[in-house]
């Protein structure tokens, strides 16, 4: 059962390996290994967003990516401990980026 996870490409867990913990009684418990954040300088910036009152990570993901579940891409580009921190401070500037591993942009 260990190996690559079966999450879709759009998931933040895509490509994260599955490992198996074996309890003393022999029961196997699968789990996902830790997911590391990509280095910020490896992400291609598409845009910046200035946080306004009422912004939420899921709404921003829908606005920029057409999919509210892609909020984690904004979190990856603007490392925070909790997603709500992204939009907690009006005036904060957020980087909107391509996912890790997607090169270029319009001119690149």
Image (spheres, rainbow, N blue to C red):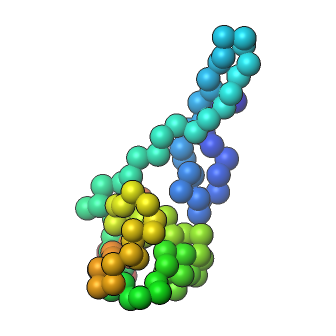
Q: Is residue 59 visible?
A: yes
Vertical comparison of 74 with 28: above or below? below
Q: Residue at x 70, y 22 (%)?
A: 28
Where residue 57 sits: x, y (%)?
49, 74
To which quarter of the image does residue 21 belong? top right
Q: Is residue 103 visible?
A: no
Where residue 82 sits: x, y (%)?
43, 60
Q: Residue at x 39, y 68 (%)?
A: 85
Where residue 103 sits: x, y (%)?
37, 66
Q: Position of 57 compared to 86: left or right?
A: right
Q: Position of 85 compared to 20: left or right?
A: left
* Quadrant of the rendering where the C terminus is positioned: bottom left
Q: Residue at x 46, y 84 (%)?
A: 55
* Quadrant of the rendering where the N terminus is positioned: top right
Q: Position of 90 compared to 22: left or right?
A: left
Residue toward you, 44 or 80: 80
């Amino acid at each position: 059962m260990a190996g690559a996870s079966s999450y879709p490409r759009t998931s933040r867990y895509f490509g994260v390996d599955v490992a198996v913990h074996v309890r003393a009684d022999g029961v196997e418990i699968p789990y996902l290994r830790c997911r590391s954040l990509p280095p910020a300088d490896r992400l291609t910036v598409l845009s910046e967003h200035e946080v306004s009152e009422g912004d939420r990570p899921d709404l921003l993901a829908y606005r920029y990516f057409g999919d509210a579940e892609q909020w984690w891409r904004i979190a990856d580009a603007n490392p925070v401990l909790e997603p709500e921190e992204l939009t907690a401070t009006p005036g904060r500037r957020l980087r909107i980026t391509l996912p890790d591993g997607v090169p270029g942009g319009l001119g690149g």
